[in-house]
Amino acid sequence: MLKIIFRDPMSLLTPAQRGQLLANQLEASRPAYSVLLLMGSALLVLLAGLEVMGWVPGIGYPPALTALGALGLSSFSVATLRVQNNGVLAATLLVYGGGLASLMSLPLDPDTIPPEFRTALFDLFPVAALALTVRRTAVLMIVGLLAIVAVLRIAVYPNPESGLAV
């Protein structure tokens, strides 16, 4: 019974069918990933603008650095459209997610606790990425990113309020 549950469904396909399926999955998901990454960068620009106006507290990064980081991260959305391999796409998501986590929810100063909405905005990224992800390795990479970010949050501020670290 367990053998049936944990069996790789790809093993039922011929190598040619498997290759075609992977190519179709990549082709169908690239535009969605690209938009996801672009929206994450747009949220960073919005946060930088709100910080400049004094409407939201910062987490230690100058708003200009946050905006420049968003511009740099937005290049990943363009790169995603050109990716020809699922492994490269997963690695792109991992690097982007690390940059987004740093600028959005990991403060420079350990005494600064980021506002909950900032952390919640970051938490939307992995949820959306997991909704788009169909490959097991990519899912494990995204879950690993979440675990690393949670550990870093706990290391930066060990007594987070309201479960903020996780």
Image (cartoon, rainbow, N blue to C red):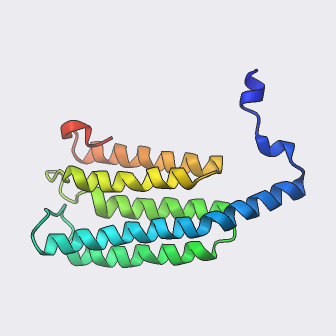
Q: Residue at x 13, y 51 (%)?
A: 111
Which percent across, then down, holds residue 14? Answer: 90, 51
Q: Is residue 112 visible?
A: yes
Farthest residue to the top: give it.
1
Q: Residue at x 42, y 56 (%)?
A: 125
Farthest residue to the left: give it.
54
- From the viewer's perspective, is 34 left or right of 88? left
**Which quadrant of the figure has residue 54?**
bottom left
- From the viewer's perspective, is 111 left or right of 96? left
Q: Residue at x 43, y 75 (%)?
A: 74
Q: Is residue 147 above or below residue 105?
A: above
Q: Is residue 14 above or below residue 89?
A: above
**Which quadrant of the figure has residue 158?**
top left
In the rendered image, the quadrant that contains the C terminus is top left
Numbered label tally: 0
In the rendered image, the quadrant that contains the N terminus is top right
Which percent across, then down, holds residue 50? Answer: 17, 70
Which percent across, then down, holds residue 107? Answer: 23, 57
**Which quadrant of the figure has residue 43?**
bottom left
